[in-house]
């Protein structure tokens, strides 16, 4: 029976010849992930299983990244709980602040912990990021994480899929963020509910792996179970460079069934902004009007990678952030931070008037490091702009690419990127 | 298992950030979470909600973050069931895993109004609006899922099963 790429990965992990959409399966997991918000609840649940050990101390990743460096006593208490659990159980992939930590979905691929063909769950909705590398990965809650840590398995309803056929290539400052915002604008925040989004077409080769991370990352913003890219030479080179395990390359059957096909000609895309309070509320940059802003955030699991910082620095080089705007730059990992230092990017940011933070999810979810007051507006390279997401319930978040964010920081209002 | 309560009604795309804002996620204490449940879209929710009450909402309820704290906060606040046109998938999974019954029932979600008294029979999936006299039929849960909800969630259910390996 013809299967999508996602279905093939799930079938292999369920030990089945084939699976079909709607079927309930129990699948083996290659990696179980949790962060400092979701892991404490999962650890408490794990204790109730009465199991001494986790299923495989090499296949669990604990990344305290949301409220770290610890923002308050309660957050510190949660992190201490995770640290103790990791020590006690001998968890190999525990990432400590400062040592090798960072935003989870940037850290794991960087450390080679995910490879093509893997089946990964994470107690974080943006776990779908690893679809960029041809893995099946999806967000779950803490109870599923606890079960995964105990037994190395999770149950899934096999998803049907939407095929997104990409052609052309992003022009000028258009990047992966604009592709995914455009798609979410087309299909809505529940347009792919319960479904896989499988990206195909000649345009895939025109997207860097970082672009693909950004796109797969926001599949959840369309309600998707996962977003996934085919494995090509770029993917294999990335996996090799980062010391990932031997990949298992799955491809969708040519006659696989899709619920629908959406075609996006990337040649025609413009920089795109999602207005409050939904990621689907998109406008192209030429339609945004006059929107004065108070803050810019460049970072997160969506757009905190080196290539994102390079684009922002290119635009900010020799310029000044508008006087009334706070521009906060957050390299997603320690390694990205160091590379940004070595390339002189951080100097560019500081000279332009940016505040450069340690790696953290921080402001993206209204945690810390850049919370908004009532009536304030931020342009952010993050992934959600729900009511109150970055702070006060009467604040606003505009989602955009690093290029648009940097240009807006200089202009003091939403602005098109230019050099 | 029959539920009866008064209805709190919300619209489409109620996300987990408004069900329980991230600024309160530095705790996993159920009472603390419940004390801030829904406050960013309904400041009166926590003062009005009573044990057994029901949330009725539109499409894609629970979209956004994977935080299990969202269904935990609703359950902790006293909510006995959420009825919606559709649910976001992670919330759907999380709610059942922690033993909060949820029903996809587009007709009921469209017709039932705020403040109505509603009874729900989880065995049969029947939803009755006592205020208007209307009844609706949702897909009933299979027996194992009813047992799981009765047990209080996946962990307790797994513990009660003879061969949970």
Image (cartoon, rainbow, N blue to C red):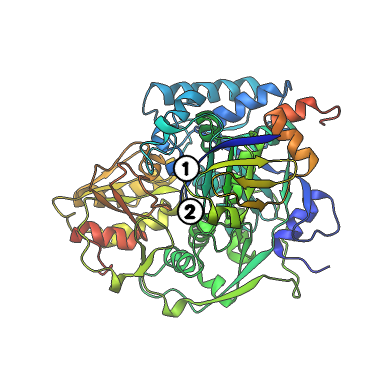
The chain carrying label 2 is: B
Decide: is B24 above or below B134: above
Q: Is residue A312 left or right of residue B153?
A: left
Quarter-wise, where is residue A190 in the image?
Answer: bottom right
Query: SS of the residue at dot 1?
Result: loop
User: Residue A163 in the image: x percent, y percent?
Assistant: 62, 70
Residues marked 2 and 1, same chain: yes
Residues under numbered marks 2 and 1 in contact, where contact means CB atoms less than 8 Å apart: no
Number of the label disc, if any, that sits on residue A166: none
Q: Is residue A32 visible?
A: no
Q: Residues within 10 Å of mark 1 (few under 14, many from 20)?
A: some
Q: Is residue A153 visible?
A: yes
Quarter-wise, where is residue B36 in the image?
Answer: top left
Residue located beneath label 1 in the image: B115
Number of the label disc, if any, that sits on residue B13: 2
Q: Residues within 10 Å of mark 2 (few under 14, many from 20)?
A: many
Decide: is B120 above or below A214: above
Q: Quadrant of the C terminus of chain A?
A: bottom left
Decide: is A366 above or below B137: above
């Amino acid at each position: 029976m013809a299967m999508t790429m996602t279905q093939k990965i799930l079938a292999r992990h369920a030990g089945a010849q084939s699976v079909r959409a709607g079927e309930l399966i129990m699948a083996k997991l290659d990696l179980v992930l949790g962060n400092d918000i979701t892991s404490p609840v999962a650890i408490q649940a794990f204790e109730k299983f009465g199991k001494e050990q986790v299923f495989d101390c090499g296949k669990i990743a604990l990344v305290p990244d949301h409220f770290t460096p610890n923002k308050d006593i309660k957050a510190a208490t949660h992190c201490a709980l995770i640290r103790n659990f990791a020590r006690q159980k001998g968890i190999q992939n525990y990432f400590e602040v400062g040592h090798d930590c960072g935003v989870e979905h940037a850290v794991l691929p960087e450390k080679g912990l995910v490879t093509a063909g893997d089946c990964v769950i994470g107690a974080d909705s943006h776990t779908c990021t690893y679809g960029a590398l041809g893995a099946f990965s999806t967000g779950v809650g803490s109870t599923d994480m606890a079960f995964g840590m105990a037994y190395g398995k999770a149950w899934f309803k096999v998803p049907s899929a939407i095929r997104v056929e990409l052609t052309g290539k992003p022009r000028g400052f258009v990047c992966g963020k604009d592709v995914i915002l455009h798609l979410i604008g087309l299909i809505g925040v529940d347009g792919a509910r319960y479904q896989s989004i499988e990206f195909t077409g000649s345009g895939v080769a025109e997207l860097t792996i970082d672009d693909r991370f950004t796109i797969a990352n926001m599949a959840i913003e369309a309600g998707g179970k996962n977003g996934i890219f085919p494995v090509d030479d770029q993917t294999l080179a990335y996996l090799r460079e980062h010391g990932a395990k031997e990949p298992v390359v799955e491809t969708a059957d040519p006659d696989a069934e899709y619920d629908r096909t959406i075609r996006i000609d990337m040649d025609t895309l413009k920089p795109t902004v999602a207005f409050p309070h939904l990621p689907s509320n998109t406008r192209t940059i030429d339609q945004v009007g006059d929107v004065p802003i108070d803050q810019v955030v460049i970072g997160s699991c969506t757009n905190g990678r080196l290539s994102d910082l390079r684009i922002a620095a290119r635009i900010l080089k020799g310029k000044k952030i508008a006087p009334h705007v706070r521009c906060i730059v957050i390299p997603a990992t320690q390694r990205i931070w160091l590379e940004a230092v070595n390339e002189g990017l951080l100097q560019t940011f500081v000279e332009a008037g940016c505040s450069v933070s340690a790696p953290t999810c921080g402001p993206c979810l209204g945690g810390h490091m850049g919370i908004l007051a009532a009536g304030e507006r931020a342009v952010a390279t993050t992934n959600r702009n729900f009511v109150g997401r970055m702070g006060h319930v009467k604040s606003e978040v505009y989602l955009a690419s690093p290029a648009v964010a940097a240009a807006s920081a200089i202009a003091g209002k939403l602005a098109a990127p230019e050099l | 298992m029959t539920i009866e309560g008064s209805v709190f009604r919300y619209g489409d795309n109620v996300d987990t950030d408004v069900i329980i804002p991230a600024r309160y996620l530095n705790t996993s204490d159920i009472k603390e979470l419940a004390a801030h449940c829904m406050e960013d879209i309904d400041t009166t929710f926590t003062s009005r909600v009573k044990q057994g009450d029901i949330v009725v909402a539109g499409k894609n309820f629970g979209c956004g973050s994977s935080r299990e704290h969202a269904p935990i906060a609703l359950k902790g606040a006293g909510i006995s069931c959420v009825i919606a046109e559709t649910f976001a998938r992670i919330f759907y999974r999380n709610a059942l895993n922690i033993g909060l019954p949820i029903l996809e029932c587009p007709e009921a979600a469209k017709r039932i109004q705020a403040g109505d008294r509603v009874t729900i029979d989880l065995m049969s999936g029947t939803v009755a609006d006592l205020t208007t006299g209307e009844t609706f039929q949702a897909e009933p849960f299979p027996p194992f899922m009813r047992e799981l909800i009765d047990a209080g969630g996946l962990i307790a259910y797994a513990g009660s099963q003879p061969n949970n390996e």
